Amino acid sequence: MALPTHVKIVEVGPRDGLQNEKQPVPTEAKVALVHALQDAGLREIEVTSYVSPKWVPQMADNAQVMAALQRRTGVRYAVLVPNLKGWEAAMADPAHRPDEIVVFGAASEAFSQKNINCSVAESIERFAPVVQAARAAGVKVRGAISCAVGCPYEGDIAPERVDLVARLKAQIGVQHVGVADTNGVGTPHRVQRALEAALRHFPLAEVSGHFHDTYGMALANVYASLELGVSTFDTSVSGLGGCPYARGATGNVATEDVVYLLHGLGIDTGIDLDRLIDAGVAIRAALGQTTGSRVARALLARRP
Ligand code: HMG
Ligand code: MG
């Protein structure tokens, strides 16, 4: 199949990236990151999570972050929601509601228990009323399928597990699924099998890749996804992050690296790479860190 001509990047750094930071990140730094990302041309940004602050303290300022955003027309702002309590909290302030929510389940039973404290079947039961409420309110629902190729607790995950969870998500009205390689163990052909399982239940435009880069395979997995026609990817500026319930997993593939790959392939993203690099440098400086993006490092070294 010919590669897509346009790719949609969903920037997950403010959520997937920062959720893993041990040090408290000031709300203003989170908001400044979202603003810098939209200035760089990102049109879909995962801003925060409405999860239990006992489980992920870093996301406890979810409502303050949403309230402080200076929203830009054409940008869609998404938040993670694990249950009805999270949905109600996300919708509580009518002036600052998300455009999209993400319900997050897993293809692995063990990871489901560790991450959201319930079985895969229970998670679907929990999500069903959230999806119903969101659709009634005109809020798009995406679903993440964690551990779609491997699990830190169970090892390899068969594509049949992804097929099952994608089918269950489609049945309850989830409109999009992200195939997530949570601990970054996937290699291109295994990732393609997982994506094909999701594609049996969702159209091509509603399946995305969410690749963590623990083993350095994420860019290869992005290319393998493009070969199937997949044209939406979750990425994290400067490679921020990981998952607090997947020990040892690193951040998502760096947005800068994916944008460089795509532009090199002649694929349009609408993103200004220089401004994106500046957004990554600024948040890493606020964290006392340096960028995790190879492309950012290379291009920064060439700046006068
Ligand atoms: P639980 O303990 O089973 O929940 O946690 P519960 O319903 O029994 O409630 C326990 C307490 O939590 C109660 O408070 C509730 O009010 C509160 P208490 O009475 O003890 O004071 N609570 C909440 N508070 C705020 N917001 C809520 C909420 N729900 C309950 N929404 C729960 C179940 C799902 C809440 C918990 O396990 C949780 O919050 N998990 C989130 C873990 C997480 O955020 N992980 C990272 C995001 S997923 C990810 O990164 C993967 C992804 O990137 C894809 C990939 O790479 O794989 C998406
Ligand atoms: Mg993730």
Image (spheres, rainbow, N blue to C red):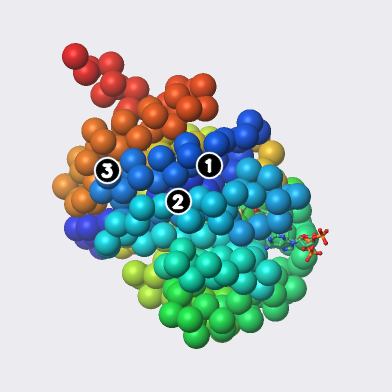
Query: Is 170 or 17 nearer to us in this picture?
Result: 17
Q: Is 66 drawn above or below residue 128 in the view shown? A: above
Whichever of labels 3 and 2 marks the residue nearer the N terminus, that label is 3
Q: Which mark is residue 103?
A: none
Q: Residue at x 62, y 71 (%)?
A: 88
Query: Is 241 or 38 nearer to us in this picture?
Result: 38
18 left or right, relative to 83:
left
Q: Is 195 drawn above or below residue 94 in the view shown? A: above
For the residues labelled 1 and 3, the Cα–Cα distance comes to 20 Å
Quadrant hosting residue 144: bottom right
- The residue identified by callout 2 is 68
Total number of numbered discs in the rendering:
3
- Marks 1/3 in contact by CB < 8 Å: the verdict is no
Sort mark 3 into few (<14), some (14-19) or many (20+) by Cα contacts within 10 Å. some
Whichever of labels 2 and 1 marks the residue nearer the N terminus, that label is 1
- The residue identified by callout 3 is 40
- The residue identified by callout 1 is 27
- On the image, the x and y values in percent for residue 301 come to 28, 16
Q: Amino acid at mark 2?
A: Ala
Q: Residue at x 66, y 57 (%)?
A: 51
Q: Amino acid at mark 3?
A: Ala
> In this view of the protein, can residue 225 be seen by the observer?
no
Sort mark 1 into few (<14), some (14-19) or many (20+) by Cα contacts within 10 Å. some
Mark 2 lies on a secondary structure that is helix
Q: Amino acid at mark 1?
A: Thr
- State which quarter of the image contains the C terminus: top left
- Marks 2/1 in contact by CB < 8 Å: the verdict is yes
Quadrant hosting residue 24: top right
